[in-house]
């Protein structure tokens, strides 16, 4: 089978968004959902050991490997997905002025003529690379500054500021390193700084503008069923890159990163507790009646577990399915004393946290302590 026939087959089996069906918000928001999903999961990957690493005052690069455990999937897809969201969003902004601004200049003579004549379908023109996209965007804002078309993009002027430009360039650099090299990866501390202090504030600005213009709501997982504003709480957590080199800032920095981790875990559960689940419907098992009741029965059964401690209404999903466990053992080697460990798990939204990263109460998340 030759290449032409193979390409024809795949063209005949395309799903053509915008032609076969319309989506709102735009398609690139699926990448945003993926980005948040994987970012939230990065705390789950490290929470068993993260607290131990952060006790030291030697915050050197080699001491903070990319995921502490060797699992890199969620770091990779966080970076790739946030980058794809921004790249496609920027091309969407270029298209507001002229759809041809998204594409590369054609090479074939016949296509050049059709392009200049405005007869070449802009959707058939390959789009520019990410690095060229940001350069073209900056040029467009400058060129159209005093023209009537500028009103279509004026509200996105923050895209020309260094804060956005530099953030997008960092994302692009790491996207390229991951796809074309692969022997280096961002560690979790750097990822937390990039995403919580730079990416999420920018995403929020985009959503505020597009949500108003295109009439769509914020993603459901921005807020838990019980009303915890996950993203707004993350936006309140502040630290900067200079803090990582100043030992005097380490206590505050530890608190900020651990608090961020707690809200990443809450974000993960909010993502699990999807729109239908919040309506007591199981998406992949729609014939099952009352899945909430099943979660509560599972939690009730755990009262028979040897390490069962008590039961709570989950502060994430609002279901009486949050079990606290307690385990006690004698450390005869290192600390020479009895050690008590607590952890909590919700059998509905899958919230899971251990006392080693601090009680949620300490961070003002719950009204009462989970762990005694």
Image (cartoon, grey):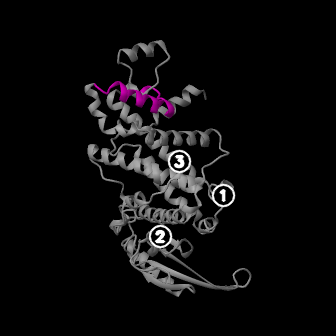
Report how far apart the C-alphas of labels 1 and 3 lie in the structure.
17 Å
Residues marked 2 and 1 touching at CB (< 8 Å): no
Is residue 141 part of the magenta span, yes or no? yes
Q: Measured along the vertical axis of the image, is residue 46 above or below residue 295?
A: above
Name the residue beneath numbered marker 3. Answer: 79
Going from N to C along the chain, the mark reached first, 2 or 1, is 1
> Which quadrant holds the N terminus?
top right
**Principal secondary structure, stretch drawn in magenta:** helix
Label 2 or label 3, whichever lies nearer to me, is 3
Q: Which of 362 and 279 is in front in this view?
A: 362
Mark 2: few/some/many CA within 10 Å (<14, 14-19, 20+): many
Report how far apart the C-alphas of labels 2 and 1 lie in the structure.
23 Å
Check disc 3 and report its element: helix, strand or loop.
helix
What number is the disc on residue 362?
A: none
Residue 366 at x, y = what percent?
Answer: 40, 74
Check disc 1 and report its element: helix, strand or loop.
loop
Residue 242 at x, y = what percent?
Answer: 54, 52
Can the viewer see residue 111?
A: yes
Is residue 207 part of the magenta span, yes or no? no
Residue 224 at x, y = what percent?
Answer: 37, 65
Mark 1: few/some/many CA within 10 Å (<14, 14-19, 20+): few
Name the residue beneath numbered marker 1. Answer: 70
Check disc 2 and report its element: helix, strand or loop.
loop
Name the residue beneath numbered marker 2. Answer: 351
Q: Nearer the viewer, residue 14 or 121?
A: 121
Going from N to C along the chain, the mark reached first, 1 or 3, is 1
Q: Quadrant of residue 93?
A: top left
Going from N to C along the chain, the mark reached first, 2 or 3, is 3
What range of the chain is rendered magenta? Answer: 124-146
Q: Measured along the vertical axis of the image, is residue 221 above or below residue 328?
A: above
Q: Which residue is drawn at 56% across and 62% down?
A: 248
Q: Measured along the vertical axis of the image, is residue 159 above or below residue 313?
A: above
């Amino acid at each position: 089978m030759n290449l032409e026939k193979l390409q024809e087959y795949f063209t005949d089996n395309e799903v053509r968004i915008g032609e076969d069906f319309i989506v709102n918000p735009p398609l690139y928001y699926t990448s945003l959902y993926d980005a948040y999903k994987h970012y939230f999961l990065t705390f789950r990957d490290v929470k068993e050991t993260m607290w131990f690493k952060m006790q030291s005052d030697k915050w050197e690069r080699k001491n903070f490997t990319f995921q502490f455990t060797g699992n890199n999937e969620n770091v990779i897809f966080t970076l790739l997905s946030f980058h794809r969201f921004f790249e496609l969003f920027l091309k969407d902004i270029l298209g507001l002025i002229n759809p041809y601004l998204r594409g590369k200049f054609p090479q074939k003579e016949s296509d050049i003529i059709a392009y200049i004549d405005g007869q070449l379908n802009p959707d058939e023109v390959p789009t520019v690379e990410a690095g060229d996209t940001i350069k073209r965007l900056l040029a467009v804002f400058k060129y159209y500054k005093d023209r009537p078309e500028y009103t279509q993009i004026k509200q996105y002027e923050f895209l020309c500021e260094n804060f956005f430009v530099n953030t997008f360039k960092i994302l692009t650099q790491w996207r390229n390193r991951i796809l074309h090299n692969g022997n280096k990866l961002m560690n979790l501390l750097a990822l937390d700084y990039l995403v919580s202090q730079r990416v999420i504030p920018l995403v929020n600005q985009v959503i505020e503008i597009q949500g108003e213009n295109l009439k769509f709501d914020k993603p459901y997982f921005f807020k838990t069923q019980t009303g915890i504003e996950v993203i707004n709480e993350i936006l309140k957590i502040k630290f900067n890159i200079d803090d990582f080199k100043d030992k005097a800032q380490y206590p505050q920095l530890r608190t900020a990163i651990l608090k961020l981790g707690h809200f990443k875990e809450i974000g993960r559960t909010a993502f699990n507790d999807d729109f239908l689940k919040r309506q007591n419907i199981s998406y992949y098992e729609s014939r099952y009646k009352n899945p909430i009741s099943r979660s509560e029965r599972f939690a009730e059964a755990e009262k028979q577990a040897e390490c069962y401690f008590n039961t709570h209404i989950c502060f994430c999903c609002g279901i009486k399915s949050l079990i606290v466990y307690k385990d006690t053992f004698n450390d005869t080697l290192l600390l020479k004393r009895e050690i008590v460990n607590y952890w909590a798990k919700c059998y509905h939204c899958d919230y899971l946290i251990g006392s080693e990263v601090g009680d949620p109460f300490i961070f003002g998340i719950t009204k009462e302590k989970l762990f005694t």
